[in-house]
Image (tube, rainbow, N blue to C red):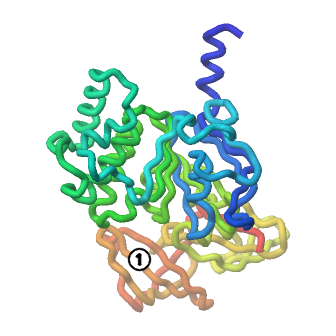
Amino acid sequence: MTGDAAMTSIDSAPLLSVASLAAGHGGRLVFEAVSFNLARGEIAALLGPSGTGKTTLLRSIAGLHAPTSGTIRLRGADASRLKPEQRGVGFVFQDLALFPHLDVAGNIAFGLARWPRAQREARVADLLQRTGLAAFGARKPHELSGGQQQRVALARSLAPKPDLLLLDEPLSSLDADLRPKLRDELRALLKSEGTAALLVTHDQDEAFAFADTVGVMLDGRLAQWSPGYDLYHRPADAAVARFVGDGRLLPVRRLDDGRVASPFGPLAANGAATSAEGLLLLRPDDVVLGEGDTDAVIIDLTFHGAETLHRLRLDDGTELSALAPSHRRFAVGERVRVRPDLAHVVVFPR
């Protein structure tokens, strides 16, 4: 293999490859059979309820927790025998773990001890500027706001230029109005650095806005690993559909012609169940108000500014929700026609 061909092969290989990984605590498995790949520069997020092993998975990748079985490959090489400091992976902890005796510049420079002084000072100055901390380099962590401390922790983790950054709910302690701003800043910084990232979060909006790819962990398994759009509109199964976003799963039955009988009449649904009975997924944004052949009455309204959430009751008693732009005004008690958006209708086996 020529040098150029070898370099192309390395660049095209996943930065991180996890295969059939299992891990636990005290002899009890927390997760098993977890497999996924993360490309160079790709940003991903892990969603799931508490106790599904998201943080344990993150710590296993970092070398801070020994998995029970399976493999972790970094840059194409087996990383199972590497110590944490040998893996070249950055880690941002939930509690930030800043060094209180060091100033901001000293915290950021902590992992650069082997760099030449001029390069070290230039890297710290660059990160101070890019994280909005240029005026705070001489301050101690306790003199900073929560958002500023978060920026220091991120800058410190990025300072050695890792190609992979692991983040364990780093934004969870911030005020709700600050989190989106810092999330967007972090994503932009990672993209500009070309750094891949894996974020653990409980916030679905945060995962969708931050990540190129989102994984859902349920009952000790990685139930789906896909772009956020597919996760929302094409969930792998009913369990993922229930966990991600809002929506109703309505019982339906399969007809002889392959369509399904639904409260809206026969539908040709994506992923139609092969069994006689199934569950039809309808998100609020999959229900179109003011169109179609099905009658409904509006039983409640919730105003969300640009959009309004309408609770509906069909004539057969089925209740569901529809999201529509607020400039289309309806009233409680008003009768409307509704139809499903067939492009996004999915049916699961029951």
- Name the spot of residue 41 as percent of width and height, x first: 50, 35
- Name the spot of residue 198 as percent of width and height, x first: 52, 48
254 shown above or below 236: below
- Name the spot of residue 45 as percent of width and height, x first: 52, 53
Residue at figure coordinates x 73%, y 45% from the top left: 19
Residue at figure coordinates x 59%, y 77% from the top left: 248
- For this orientation, the residue located farthest to the front is 101
**Residue 230 at least partly seen:** no
Residue at image mark 1: 309
- Name the spot of residue 67 as percent of width and height, x first: 70, 52
Residue 205, image quadrant:
bottom left
Residue at figure coordinates x 35%, y 40% from the top left: 189
81 shown above or below 178: above
In the picture provided, is 223 more to the left or to the right than 40?
Answer: right
In the picture provided, is 120 more to the left or to the right than 243?
Answer: left
**Residue 64 at least partly seen:** yes
Q: Nearer the viewer, residue 24 or 350?
A: 24
Residue at figure coordinates x 14%, y 42% from the top left: 135
- For this orientation, the residue located farthest to the top is 2
In the picture provided, is 348 more to the left or to the right than 306?
Answer: right
Identify the secondary structure beneath mark 1.
Answer: strand
Instruction: Indicate the amino acid at tag 1.
Output: Leu
Q: Nearer the viewer, residue 220 or 22?
A: 22
